[in-house]
Structure formats: C-alpha cells, structure tokens
Image: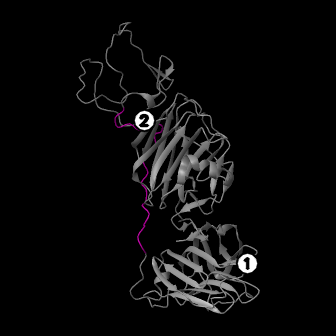
Amino acid sequence: MNIDDAEMVEDDSVPDDLITDSPMYFGGLPSGFSVTSKAVLTTENIGGCMGDITINKKFQNLAIVPEKFGVTLGECSEEEEEEEEDTGKATLPPDLPPDQCGLAPRPSDHSGENTSIKGMRFGATLYSRYEYDMLPVKIKIRTVVFSMSFKTSTPSGMLFYTSDPEHIDFLGLYMLDGKLNYGFNCGSGTAVMTSPLNYNDGKWHHVKVTRYRQNGILNVDGVDVASGKSPGITQSLNTKAPYYVGGVREEVEKKAMKNLKDGFHSFHGCIDNVTANGLDLGPPSVEVDVAPCSKDLEPGSFIGSGGGYVETYDTYNVGKDMEVHVQIRPRSLNGILIAVQGTSNDFLALQMVEGSIVFTVDNGAGPISVTFEPSVQNVLCAGNWHDIHASKKGNDLKLTVDGVTVEQIGNGNPKSTSANTNGPLYIGGFPANAVKGVEPTGQFVGCIRHLRLNKKVQNIAAGYARRDISLKACPV
C-alpha cells in the first residue's frame, strides 16, 4: 500500500488469489450489509472526498456506476455560509414628510473595503456575456461536469451554451419559467432535463450538470433532481468554441433559440465559480457588459443628483401609435423619464411631477395628457422598483403604474393624431434647449431599467451619457 507516493506499507501474509462474489463499494457499505472479514475494522461511511480511482491502472468513471447513495459527483468543495438576499419591499418611515423620498439623492460610496462582492453580474445589456475560446478539459467523448453558482430573480435566461456551427450538437444550461433546464444533443436527438422546483428566488444556488456519452444528470444544491438520455446512437459531442456564459452574440441568438427556447436570453443576475471537471475556466476571451456582483449594486442605469441624461437615437418619430414600458426606482419627486420632440410643436414626454407620473403628447393641435396620482406623494420614491406602461393610440392615452391604469380617451383634434417628432430620444433628463412639454422643476434622480419602445428592448447603456450618469449599475 503506497500513501502519497512516499510511505509504503507491505504485508506478504495475504493469499495470491482472492475470490470475491459481491459488488465493489467505495465510500461506505449499504445498510444491512454483513461483513465477516476481520480485515474491515469499521463499517462507518467516509465523510469526505475521493477522486481519480483506478483499478489495475484503468480509470473508473463513477458517473456510470449503477447505484449511488448520498454522493455528489464531479467536484468536492467546502460549503460556504451564504448570505441570503433581502427581497422584501422597502417601506417609508412613518415620520417621513410626504415631500421627501425614502432614498437619499446621493447614495453612499460603495467602492470601499466593506463592499461585499461575490461573482459577476450579467444582464446589464441585451448581449451581456463571457466568451471562452477553450475549456480546461476535452468534452467531445470524455465525461464532463460543468458547475457554477448563480442567483437571479428573473424567470428565464442562459447560464452556459456551446454548439457546433449548425447548432445541432449542443450543450446548454438555462432557466425557463424559473426552473433549471439542462439539454444536450450528440447529433441524433436532444435530451432535456428540468428541475421540479423554481430557483429564481434571489438566493444563491449551486448547479452541476454531468454528461457521459448519451447520459446526463442535473444536480442542484447537492441533489440530483433530474436525469436523461439522448436518443439515437451517437455519443460524441462535436461542439466548437466559443463557449458562452451568461449570454450569446446577437448573430447566434436565433439559432440558439431552437435549442434553448425562451431561455436563450441573456441571464439577469450573478454567476460565480464556473468550472469544468472542477477546473476554473479562467479569464474569458471576450467580456461584454459584465460587472462585479455586489449587494450594493444591481443592473440598470443611474442618473445622479449632479444632473444628466442619456441620449439615444439621432432622430425618433413617435407617429400615430407608441408604447413605452420602463421600470424606475426614483430618489426624487420630479424629473423627465422619457422625452422626444419635433421641430414643430409635436412632442412626447413621460415625467414625474411632485410624485405623480404624467404622460403628455402633442400631435400638433395642443398637448393632451393623463396623470397617475399615488395615494401618498412620496410612495414611488420609497426605494422600490415600479413598473410603468404608457401607450398612445392616436389621441387616446393610457398610463399604467404598478398595475393601476388611468386613461384619457377621445381628447384632442381628431384630424391630428400623429406626433411627428424628429429629435433625439432623451432618458432621465434633457439638455437645456429641449424644454418642450416639460413640467418638472427638478432633475430626475434614480435608476431606470428594462426600457422597451413598441415592445422592442432598448439598450440604455449603448446611449450617449451626459454628466452624472452610471450606465451599467444602480446603487441599492
């Protein structure tokens, strides 16, 4: 017996031939198993890790053994005590005056030594991602175990993906409707494994996926939750670089969608400790809009108290119909959220006015508007995210804030129904010479995210930032 290639223990009293008729066990013995040999001094199961098992110089693949009990394959690491994310709603202090916000206009400096950072945050922009030109292990034929930790509050998004150029052979790990999905295709059919539980609870989870030829296992938080086998006879996985984490390139998106369904979108949340067979993937070859994950920061664009705005589109025409969908977390009672105007009187403006949300449009015959007034003046700046949906159909306006809808129907000149704007689209503020239709007396301060215009996702971080703007992160 050789220990650590250093200590050798020998005994010549053992017979040359041993005849056994039971299975070979590693790590412990089944319940009720009777041991009569004095060579086994204890039947207690080992609590720890084992690896690189060989018998007669032949490597043993434990992923394909017929029975496993209380065993986690692929890696062995110490459990870390993790802090749970507080997903509760912020509330206003009872003694706070109604004309003051629950969040201070100037957030504290989160760049100090006490900042808690774990992993990297993905999803700040539409194609946020890591790309790797190579992996630390070969995955074509050999057993491969990919693992990572993640946390998210969104239901869908891609964690890992690789494929051949035609996206026939692939391996993907993604979230769909809150559940983890693991799929692969060796060329003759797809195996898909789905977790029975949801994991978009804003807490850290550890996921591990194993593939051995046509067999796959999905393991979450140390428990095997699903297994599957790809159909057909092919057993090798012929994928090529790049290997994607957190998202894919725009030109790959449509092809990846056939394998990942609605899970092809960029992942919105944090990812940490991505490994292949226990080996770290190392620094990515390409990094697109990824930032450290901190409890003090989250995705979005922040307009600071020093004033500023984001300019997108050189010219934007509102036309007859338009929809605006955006989420905000204000630190002020006033300010422009979205604004665009034309060379004539036409304009569109979505703004906060003394705590209310006002949606105003001028189709050329005078402004028409609709207003959402909260029950308490400062309830929208208590520290929570708020969902705003504003729509224009000719002269009919509709404004929905956190599910509550107000409408303005049949107003304005029926012969003038189109807002012929041709100026830039401004987010979070406006330049000094663009004041058409603007009511607020102060600068908007706070966070904006998930902007969609006519149902099309807008990448705010790709706009031109002016003055006190942070495009890719919001202070909590």
Q: Is residue 70 found inside the magenta-colored segment of the image? A: yes
- Please tell me whether residue 343 is drawn above or below residue 74 in the rendered image: below
Q: Nearer the viewer, residue 43 or 447?
A: 447
Q: Position of residue 8 (x, y in %)?
A: 46, 19
The amino acid at mark 2 is Cys
Q: Is residue 272 visible?
A: no
Main SS class of the magenta portion in the image: loop
**In the image: residue 94, left or right of residue 284:** left
The residue labelled by disc 1 is 424
Does residue 288 show up? yes
Q: Secondary structure at mark 2?
A: loop
x then y, percent, for residue 210: 49, 38
Q: Magenta part of the protein: which range? A: 68-89
1 relative to 74, above or below: above
Residue at left 65%, top 93%?
366
Q: Residue furthest top?
A: 16
Under mark 1, the amino acid is: Pro
At label 1, counting other C-alpha atoms closer than 10 Å, the crowd grade (few under 14, some 14-19, many 20 or more) is some
Tell me if residue 142 comes above or below residue 194 in the rendering: above
| Residue lying at the far front of the rendered structure | 415
Q: At 65% across and 79% down in the image, what residue appears?
A: 320
How far is disc 1 from disc 2 in space, using C-alphas?
Answer: 60 Å
- Residue at the disc numbered 2: 49
Q: Nearer the viewer, mark 1 or mark 2?
A: 1
For the point 63% across and 54% down, the residue is 129
- Quarter-wise, where is residue 29 in the image? top left
Q: Is residue 34 left or right of residue 350?
A: left
Magenta-drawn stretch contains 374: no
Residue 463 vertical position relative to residue 2 in the rendered view, above or below: below
